[in-house]
Amino acid sequence: MNDVTRQDRLESGGDPIDLALEPAGPNHTTNSALTNGGRPTVVEIDLRALRANYHALKAAAPRSDLMAVVKANAYGHGAVAVSRTLAAEGCRYFGVATIDEARELRRAGIDARIFLQAGFFASQAREVVDLDLTPFVYDASLLAPLNRAARENGRRVFPIHLKIDTGATRLGILLRDLPSLLETLRECPAVQIEGVCTLLANAGDPTSAVTDSQLSVFRDALATLRQHGITPRISHVANSAALVLRGDSHFDLARPGLALYGLPPVSAVREKVDLKPVMTFRTRLMQLKRVPSGAGVGYGHTFTTQRESLIGVLPVGYADGYKRGLQHGGEVLIRGHRAPVVGAVSMDLTTIDVTDVPMVAMGDDVILWGGSGGDVISVNDVARLVQTISYEMLCTVGMRVPRVCLS
């Protein structure tokens, strides 16, 4: 059954919404998740699909634990709801990018391990310790501030994970600098290397020589640590693609992100693991108007009707994450038919041509991406139309769009 929990209402900024617009056509939906008179543009988060994806990925890497990556509001899906759901499925590790993201989870009662993946500044060390986060440490200069913060907090041992730059040339310690960092570590007795990790730059290609080289450098880093008397308890490398395509990257822990949300980062992943999209972006038809041939539509009249046409107006725009570039080839699903986006996508409104959609009526359900009946508009396909990637499409769904959880 579809549910909206109290937390879901809080995260969406109010009470659950009702998608009923009058007059409603026979395609009117009455999902209990959509039960109030607010704006009908929402994303539905299918928690059943999320659970299925989590277990499918665990099965793909049976010797590794999983760190569920919930940064960027769980890729736009709602970090608190996603984390609570996966914690109930046995997930013990969660990854965020910022201290603010971690603080949100702690305030929501998430007491599992939270890993700070995207770095922090020395001035933030005290909060990293106070929130009991496990930071990815990428520079020796962070060790002393963490040691000081740990001791002030009464922590005799504070675990960190070293991030090794094996070739991605982003945050991380170069192999040549590792011995020097370990010398600094000797002066920081409260800081303990629990884990070591790296970022793969080209994991989507299972035959990539870049990945081969990075794994080799990573193993050299592990050997260097052992030479200095340090054997990390947890080693981790694999992201979503590597988890499925590179068994030699599994180690002790894998860090799936996009795949958790049902989107294969590359097509080869889809062929090996059955993933179910978690997000459906939907709205309702707000207005219908019949216009003659030659009518200009929207700002700049970038589209002109070539026949008498029925134009529909949707209460969604680029402020909601529906990209402006979708005026060029974008489609939506309505009454089991595809209808093209026509005219410029504006900040709050989008226009579609529904001339060929039988029995179309105001209030009809409209899928921007996701499935309806036997058809699906994949966010991967939507992303390609605007020359970006599905990660960005998901993460930029606007915060004024409520996340409605279906359990």
Image (cartoon, rainbow, N blue to C red):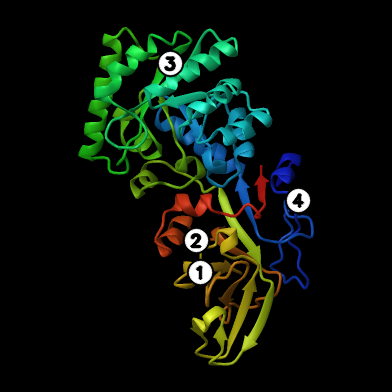
**Earlier-in-chain disc, 1 versus 2:** 1
In the structure shown, which secondary structural element does the residue marked by tag 1 occupy?
strand
Residue 126's spot in the image, x, y percent?
Answer: 56, 22
Is residue 80 shown above or below 184?
A: below
**Marks 3/4: CA distance?**
43 Å
Give the class, few, some or many, for how many residues have Cα within 10 Å of label 3's Cα (few <14, many ≥20): some
| In the image, farthest residue toward the bottom | 293
**Earlier-in-chain disc, 2 versus 3:** 3
In the structure shown, which secondary structural element does the residue marked by tag 3 occupy?
strand
Give the class, few, some or many, for how many residues have Cα within 10 Å of label 1's Cα (few <14, many ≥20): many
In the structure shown, which secondary structural element does the residue marked by tag 4 occupy?
loop
Give, as a three-letter code, the residue at label 4. Answer: Pro
Question: Which disc, if any, is residue 194?
Answer: 3
Q: Which of 360/139 is in front?
A: 139
Give, as a three-letter code, the residue at label 3. Answer: Glu
**Earlier-in-chain disc, 1 versus 4:** 4
Give the class, few, some or many, for how many residues have Cα within 10 Å of label 2's Cα (few <14, many ≥20): some
Residue 275's spot in the image, x, y percent?
Answer: 47, 44
Contact flag, marks 4 and 2 (Cβ < 8 Å): no
**Earlier-in-chain disc, 3 versus 4:** 4
Residue 309 visible in this rendered orientation of the protein: yes
Relative to 139, 306 lies left or right:
right
